[in-house]
């Protein structure tokens, strides 16, 4: 029982740090504004991640393209890793490091947003995708852990959760992502 309580407390502690970090709260707010403006301009939002972060990316994309709280028009958002034929072909023929950058090069348009989730901030395929996005005039939002890793340098907005513990970071990514989804939905469709 004590171990369970200590794990719950560890999650609460990270969220408490997030609550008290004004710079991080501003980054979440900047993300809301950037994504809201992107959708209002008829542009798209793309998500990418690896492993559990891929699942979180897909989850957050679905909150926009499906719905969050409100029955409303679908918003153009998608996770880039859902086409397994594409992923395995590019991973096999080129490199796993290129799976997201090739897709952003192929379908991304200036004014779109690319959101990458990487707890370390050092996922090569996400960094390469952000570099390609920058070349194309696509805005980038990085969801990372404490340091931001290498993703920090190529992110227009960085949401770097104040932790180095992967599960705690991912829990906070979903919290921050849900906040962004709710506020974007409210700004576009009303509360």
Image (cartoon, helix red, strand yellow):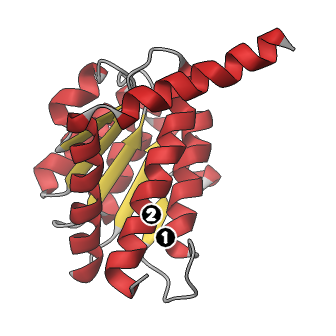
Q: Is residue 90 visible?
A: no
Looking at the picture, tell me which residue is in the foreground, 188 or 45: 188
First in sequence, mark 1 or 2: give its number: 1
| Secondary element at tag 1 | helix
Residue 64 numbered mark, or none: 1
Q: Are marks 1 and 2 in contact (CB under 8 Å)?
A: yes
The part of the image, by quadrant, that contains residue 37 is bottom left
Looking at the picture, tell me which residue is in the foreground, 15 or 48: 15
Would residue 179 be found to the left or right of residue 63 on screen?
A: left
Counting every numbered tag in the picture gives 2
The residue where tag 2 is placed is 181
- Across and down, in percent, residue 22 comes to 23, 37
The quarter of the picture where the C terminus appears is bottom left
Residue farthest along the right direction in this orientation: 1
- Across and down, in percent, residue 49 comes to 48, 40
| Secondary element at tag 2 | helix
Q: Residue at x 36, y 26 (%)?
A: 124
Q: Residue at x 12, y 58 (%)?
A: 137
- Across and down, in percent, residue 157 comes to 21, 44
In whole angstroms, how far apart are the C-alphas of marks 1 and 2? 7 Å
Would residue 143 be found to the left or right of residue 52 on screen?
A: left
Looking at the picture, tell me which residue is in the foreground, 37 or 103: 37
């Amino acid at each position: 029982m004590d171990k369970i309580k200590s794990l719950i407390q560890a999650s609460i502690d990270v969220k408490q740090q997030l609550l008290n970090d004004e710079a991080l709260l501003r980054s979440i707010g900047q993300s809301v504004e950037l994504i809201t403006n992107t959708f209002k301009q008829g542009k798209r939002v793309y998500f990418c991640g690896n492993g559990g972060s891929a699942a979180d990316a897909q989850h957050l994309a679905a909150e926009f393209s499906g719905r969050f709280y409100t029955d409303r028009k679908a918003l153009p958002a998608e996770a880039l890793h859902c086409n397994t034929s594409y992923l395995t072909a590019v991973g096999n023929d080129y490199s796993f490091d290129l799976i997201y950058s090739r897709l952003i090069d192929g379908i991304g348009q200036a004014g779109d947003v690319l959101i990458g989730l990487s707890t370390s901030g050092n996922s090569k395929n996400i960094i390469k995708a952000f570099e390609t996005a920058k070349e194309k005039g696509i805005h980038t939002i990085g969801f990372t852990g404490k340091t931001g890793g290498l993703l920090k340098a190529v992110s227009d907005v960085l949401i770097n959760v104040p932790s180095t513990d992967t599960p705690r970071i991912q829990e906070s990514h979903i919290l921050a992502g849900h906040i962004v989804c709710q506020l974007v939905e409210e700004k576009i469709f009303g509360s």
